[in-house]
Image (tube, grey):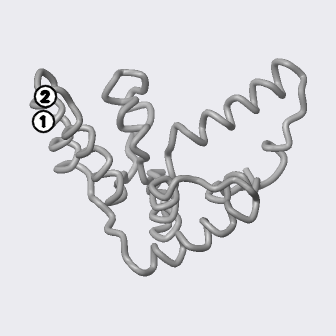
Amino acid sequence: MARRVVLDTGVLIAIERGRLDVDTVLGLDDAAIAAITAMELLVGVERADTAHRQARAVRVEAILSSLPVEPYNVGIARVHARLAVAAMAAGRPRSANDMMIAATAAATSRILLTTDITRAYVRAFLDQHLRGRPQALLDQPSPRYPEVTFCSP
């Protein structure tokens, strides 16, 4: 069954750099990006040196023309506000851009695919299962990552 997903900028960069395989990551998923992700990719083009700017621009334009871009609207802003307050209350404020991407996923009923949160959960999994150190992050939803939802199998 295909999932509805929002791709974080880090996932797109990892795919571009060959660290993630697009077919493995997405398969038949219905993927989209948040408008802020489009901006982050375009910033990468603007910051690229002259020798790399054209190639980067071509790659970014290919992404932007092949994936739907979810606009930032009032519904997403409401979810963004709730996520931001939850993260601040937990003492773990996140960047505005990351919160906008997470809010876009939540508001559009999509799953967020990100390398940032994935790193934290993979690290916790390895610590718990390979080093024998219990990790509270794996027990229940965490206020550090309010955008993550636990599902029963």
Query: How many numbered circles does the render carry?
Result: 2
The percent coordinates of residue 113 (x first, y second) are 49, 46
Check whether the beta carbons of the residues at disc 1 and disc 2 lie within 8 A of each other: yes
The percent coordinates of residue 145 (x first, y second) are 67, 53
Which class describes the residues within 10 Å of circle 2: few (<14), some (14-19), or many (20+)? Answer: few
Q: Would you place residue 25 above or below residue 81 in this image?
A: above
Side of 147 relative to 58 (left or right): right
Side of 44 relative to 137 (left or right): left
Mark number for residue 123? none
Which class describes the residues within 10 Å of circle 1: few (<14), some (14-19), or many (20+)? Answer: few
The percent coordinates of residue 30 (x first, y second) are 37, 53
Q: Residue at x 28, y 52 (%)?
A: 38
The percent coordinates of residue 72 (x first, y second) are 36, 70
Q: Would you place residue 42 above or below residue 143 in this image?
A: above
Secondary structure, mark 1, is: helix
Q: Quadrant of residue 56?
A: top left
**Type of the residue with mark 1:** Val
* Cα gap from disc 1 to disc 2, whole angstroms: 5 Å
Q: Nearer the viewer, residue 65 or 41?
A: 41
Q: Nearer the viewer, residue 71 or 4?
A: 71
**Type of the residue with mark 2:** Ala
Q: Quadrant of residue 16?
A: top left
Q: Would you place residue 114 above or below residue 16 in this image?
A: below
Q: Nearer the viewer, residue 60 or 94?
A: 94
Q: Nearer the viewer, residue 61 or 50?
A: 50
Q: Quadrant of residue 14?
A: top left
Secondary structure, mark 2, is: helix
Residue at numbered disc 1 = 58
Mark number for residue 55? 2
